Amino acid sequence: MTTTSWQHIGVDWDAGKWVAVGYSDTGEAGVDSYAAFKDIWTEHGDTADRILVDIPIGLRGPSKDADGHDEHNESQSRRCDRLARKVIGPRSSSVFPAPCRAAVEAALDGDKSHSELSEINREAVGKGLTQQAASIIPGIAQVDRVLAEEAADETIIESHPEVCFRAFTDEPLQYNKTSAQGLATRLDALAASTEYEPGTWRTLADELAGDHAIGVDDLVDALGLALTARANHDAFHSLPDTDSVPTDASGRPMRMCYRRAEPFDLD
């Protein structure tokens, strides 16, 4: 548990554990790992202005035709996913289709295999579910539960590290984040942010020295999200833009936010 209250937070989830990087109102950076997303909210929800999380928040579901039958159409896919792939180019495979709400709820009701969840997803929105998408369902459920229980819709916001790094540097990233080249280019991207202090990632890594479950790539992703959360209002944008963000059946936005002087021109 941290001893400093955080105002701007970036959160990454991997293999059942959360790593969160936060900035206090004085600009001091800190890091911690958590077993549950609820613990992050309990510890920092009262002071946080933004918590950016690399987990889908707005989830797809079936639409109905005029006769009340399920209808699969393009509006039911997440436009933010399609735009994110366009923005990050060579790294587009890192944005995979999010599971629909029916698949998430089915996974919580009991043990379901990947093939079973994929079929549920196909029945609901017309497409199967990748193994990667199925693997993040527990994380989706944890975030969704906090949003259902707390007045946090304006604080807990979906983002994606690859989109954030692309926005920092204005150049597409070419390499996987787990490779040496990938780490180097992401650290260069962090350095492009005016609020990043050189060596911050190394200091935070030292703080996590006792937690061997957190990889350097996950730490750097969370740091990129935290720096994005620090953006002023004029530099905080979303895919799609704020005037055309769709919502899911629960009223949650299907968007990914990023930090950039001007929004991406995707026309």
Image (spheres, rainbow, N blue to C red):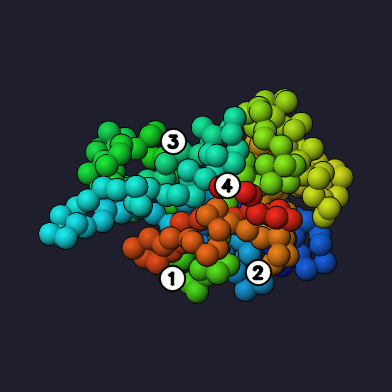
The secondary element bearing badge 4 is classed as loop
| Other residues around mark 1 within 10 Å, as few (<14) / some (14–19) / many (≥20) | few
| Position of 252 relative to 31 (above/below) | below
Amino acid type at image mark 1: Glu
The image quadrant where one finds the N terminus is: bottom right
The secondary element bearing badge 1 is classed as helix
Instruction: Report which quarter residue 87 is drawn in.
Output: top right
Q: Earlier in the sequence, mark 1 or mark 4?
A: 1
Q: Nearer the viewer, residue 211 or 149?
A: 149
Q: Position of residue 73 (x, y in %)?
A: 29, 48
Q: Earlier in the sequence, mark 3 or mark 4?
A: 3
Q: Position of residue 262 (x, y in %)?
A: 70, 55
Q: Which residue is mark 4?
A: 266
Q: Residue furthest front?
A: 267
Could you tell whether 217 is left or right of 23 in the image?
left
| Other residues around mark 2 within 10 Å, as few (<14) / some (14–19) / many (≥20) | some
Q: Which numbered mark, 1 or 4, is in the foreground of this view?
A: 4
Q: Position of residue 96 (x, y in %)?
A: 46, 38
Residue at image point 81% right, 62% down: 27
Q: Earlier in the sequence, mark 4 or mark 2?
A: 2
Q: CA distance from mark 3 to mark 1?
A: 27 Å
In the rendered structure, are the residues bearing label 2 and label 3 in contact, judged by CB atoms less than 8 Å apart? no
Q: Which residue is mark 1?
A: 149
Q: Which residue is mark 2?
A: 49
Q: Nearer the viewer, residue 212 or 125?
A: 125
Residue at image point 63% right, 28% down: 176
In the rendered structure, are the residues bearing label 3 and label 4 in contact, judged by CB atoms less than 8 Å apart? no
